[in-house]
Image (spheres, rainbow, N blue to C red):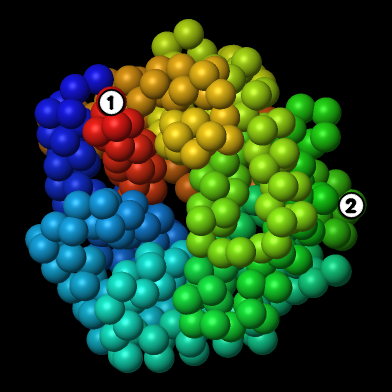
Amino acid sequence: MEKRSLNKNIDLLLRGFTELKDNGRFNEPNLDGSAGDYISFSSWEWPQGVGLFGLVRLWENTKSDDLYQIIDQWFQGNIEKGLPSLNVNTTAPMLPLSLFWSHHRQPHYQQVLDNWANRVMTELPRTPEQGFQHVVSDGINEMEIWDDTLFMVVLFLAHYGTVSGRQELVDEVVRQFLLHARYLNDPQTGLWYHGWSFVENSNFAKARWARGNAWITVGILELLELADVGAGVREYLIECLKKQVNTLIDLQADNGAWHTLLDHPDSYIEISATAGFGYGLLKGARLGIGDERWLEAGMKALAIVQDNIDVEGTVHNVSYGTRMGRTLQFYKDIPLQPTGYGQALAILCLSEGLRLADNK
């Protein structure tokens, strides 16, 4: 693993992300009748939110002025245009905005963050036991919780609640993580199911979906850095993470990647999840949570992620946005499409690899 190669690929990933355009292929209608754009860099949606999270984390490590300007201009431009309706997925850009704001405390950003946090707490529909219902731009998903929500919404509340001194937001974070773990974590394997329906009392297809599990791997590690959730909750989540990762390592393919259905080797290799797992494994090893097996598996993931970056900086073999599936075949049929979250998770994975190289 050479630092020069990692830096070159990170630069390529950044270019590939900022140049992404939908081109009408996946322009899906939102509930309000507007055209949903889940690919183009300029759009305010969850893929771009995850992408900005990767950029902000990269800026925190590099302090690059050019990167700062890209991030600042993205938020300024979208806020001036007017933000979309509140839901789980449109909340995703608020986490990178909170991280970005915390460094300089710009008042115009704080007003946006404070208002959005208030609305999440009071307007986002709830399931029984007060879980955040997974309402998104193109679907209500009545009385359903999904593993995606923890990354898209709850990490924002964790960070903003901590840096703004709003303990009630952090308390809500604890409730959401524990509730989602109760219904989505499979105690037999430690892997997480995609979702739970309080209407049907079921986990739908019982899909142990790769990217959903990657949101959990990354999400738990980020939560432990973003907020103080108390020693008991912290230790509980670390044990959940260890159980999950130890199973993941056993399911890693020989080439270093994971299948889109983790325990179904007939499903395709999926690189966004692989990047998320690679990031989590390397970071967990660096923090002393994981052992040498984590480091070895993380290095294999890092290598295959780099193999899937083309000369234009585009990450390939990334599955498109995935709704809740009622059959396992549904997940196997999701098309492959370059996306902002594919770029972002790869940036996170390579950045963690770079930290490892710097410490050698």
Q: Nearer the viewer, residue 244 or 164?
A: 164
283 left or right, relative to 339: right
Residue visible at 34% across and 47% down in the picture? 344
Q: Which residue is mark 1?
A: 360
Circle 2 residues within 10 Å: few <14, some 14–19, many ≥20: few
At label 1, the amino acid type is Lys
Earlier residue among tags 2 and 1:
2
**Alpha carbon separation for disc pair 2 and 1:** 50 Å
Query: Residue 199: x percent and y percent?
Result: 87, 60
Q: Is residue 250 left or right of residue 279?
A: right
Name the image quarter holding the N terminus: top left
Residue 313 visible? The answer is: no
SS at mark 1?
Answer: loop
Instruction: Tell whether label 1 touches label 2 (CB within 8 Å).
Output: no
Residue 92 image offset from top left, x and y in percent? 46, 65
Residue name at image x 18 percent, y 73 percent? 73
Residue at which label 2 appears: 201
Looking at the image, residue 345 lies above or below residue 299: below
Residue type at numbered disc 2: Asn
Residue closest to the eye, 351 or 231? 231
- Which residue occupies 27% across, 78% down? 104
Quadrant, the C terminus: top left
Q: Is residue 12 visible?
A: yes
Residue 346 position by quadrant? top left
Sort mark 1 into few (<14), some (14-19) or many (20+) by Cα contacts within 10 Å.
few
Q: Is residue 174 above or below residue 169?
A: above
